[in-house]
Image (cartoon, rainbow, N blue to C red):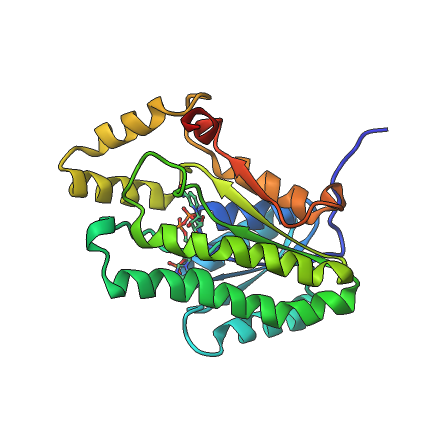
Amino acid sequence: MAVSIDLSGKCALVTGGSQGIGRGCGEWLARAGAAVALVARNGKNLDEVVQDIRRAGGRAEALPADLTEPGRTEWAVGETVQRLGALDFLVNVAGTARRSDPAETTDGDIDLSINLKVRAAVRLVKAAVPHMKARGGGSIVFTLGLAHVHTSVWHGSGCMSNGMLLPYKHQLARRVAPWNIRVNAVNPGVTETPRMTIQQQRIADLTGTSVDDVARDRLAAIPMGRFVRVDDVAKLVVFLCSDMGSYITGESITVDGGETNAVR
Ligand SMILES: NC(=O)c1ccc[n+]([C@@H]2O[C@H](COP(=O)([O-])OP(=O)(O)OC[C@H]3O[C@@H](n4cnc5c(N)ncnc54)[C@H](OP(=O)(O)O)[C@@H]3O)[C@@H](O)[C@H]2O)c1
């Protein structure tokens, strides 16, 4: 008998769903049968993704919102439950492409990163957990990163917010495990998304080199010889949401073609 992942009847909220990794997660969850609600600020971009998912036969809703604004996280969870009927999966992807020199990181850099990546994610969790309890379980996924082990030193504030979520994820996993809610993090390496170009340009500006040089150096450090594709991350997220990951919680799983293994 063939093994497959079927998320029919399940409902997911994906932040950062208009492009990049979040879009990929939304599309793959929908492909697996889940109904998805996607959050981002730009409603036009979100609508395009939602239409694509619907054309492919999936169920999707657009929830345009700036998650750093007061009340928008609770609104997003409430709308998901109202429009889709329930909430089983919370996939936190929204983040900023900001890069900074660690020696010159500003309060503004820190606020931007932490308000979205940490504050909004924690508020979403708080609003989502009661709905997951009511469903008899759920899966929460954080999209973090590998800046703490990379040779590149230009992650600045983004690295801080990911670092803050690591112990939080661990604690949360222990706290909600009795309700069959699992909590995991995925750690992508350099992923081919719109932000990749922005980040590489920023690093080139900070180091006085070219984008091509930044990309070539980074690629040379990846044993599998290519950047991460959005699909590589999204498929892991689907796995972690599904029953295939039924006893995995509190974990951080790396998707980087062996890059950090090679660094170690
Ligand atoms: N790409 C990588 O190489 C990489 C590697 C490791 C980890 N990550 C992590 O993966 C996540 C996604 O990365 P990505 O490359 O896919 O990013 P991306 O292409 O820049 O997409 C970011 C998404 O977040 C949304 N967003 C940004 N600010 C928001 C806000 N205030 N409220 C609501 N939504 C907001 C954006 O839409 P709007 O602009 O319309 O709001 C967009 O949908 C990030 O958290 C990042 O730290 C990425």
Q: Position of residue 49 (x, y in %)?
A: 50, 52
Hey, which quadrant is residue 221 in on the image? Answer: top left
Q: Is residue 162 toward the left or the right of residue 211 in the image?
A: right
Q: Is residue 172 toward the left or the right of residue 92 in the image?
A: right
Q: Position of residue 109 (x, y in %)?
A: 28, 60
Would you say residue 75 is visible in this rendering?
yes
The quadrant of the image that shows the C terminus is top left
Instruction: Work out whether 263 lies above or below 65.
Output: above
Q: Position of residue 34 (x, y in %)?
A: 68, 53
Hey, which quadrant is residue 117 in on the image? Answer: bottom left
Of residues 209 and 148, the one drawn nearer to the viewer in this rendering: 148
Instruction: Work out whether 66 lies above or below 197.
Output: below
| Residue beneath the point at 68% across and 45% down | 32
Would you say residue 86 is visible in this rendering?
no
Instruction: Work out whether 260 lies above or below 88.
Output: above
Q: Is residue 123 toward the left or the right of residue 35 in the image?
A: left
Of residues 107 and 56, the one drawn nearer to the viewer in this rendering: 107
Q: Position of residue 226 (x, y in %)?
A: 42, 25
Of residues 110 and 98, the one drawn nearer to the viewer in this rendering: 110
**Residue occupying the far bottom of the picture:** 71
How many numbered markers are drawn? Answer: 0
| Residue beneath the point at 61% across and 74% down | 78
Of residues 256 and 104, the one drawn nearer to the viewer in this rendering: 104
| Residue beneath the point at 54% across and 35% down | 232
The quadrant of the image that shows the N terminus is top right
| Residue beneath the point at 32% across and 29% down | 218
**Residue occupying the far left of the picture:** 208
Hey, which quadrant is residue 149 in on the image? Answer: top left
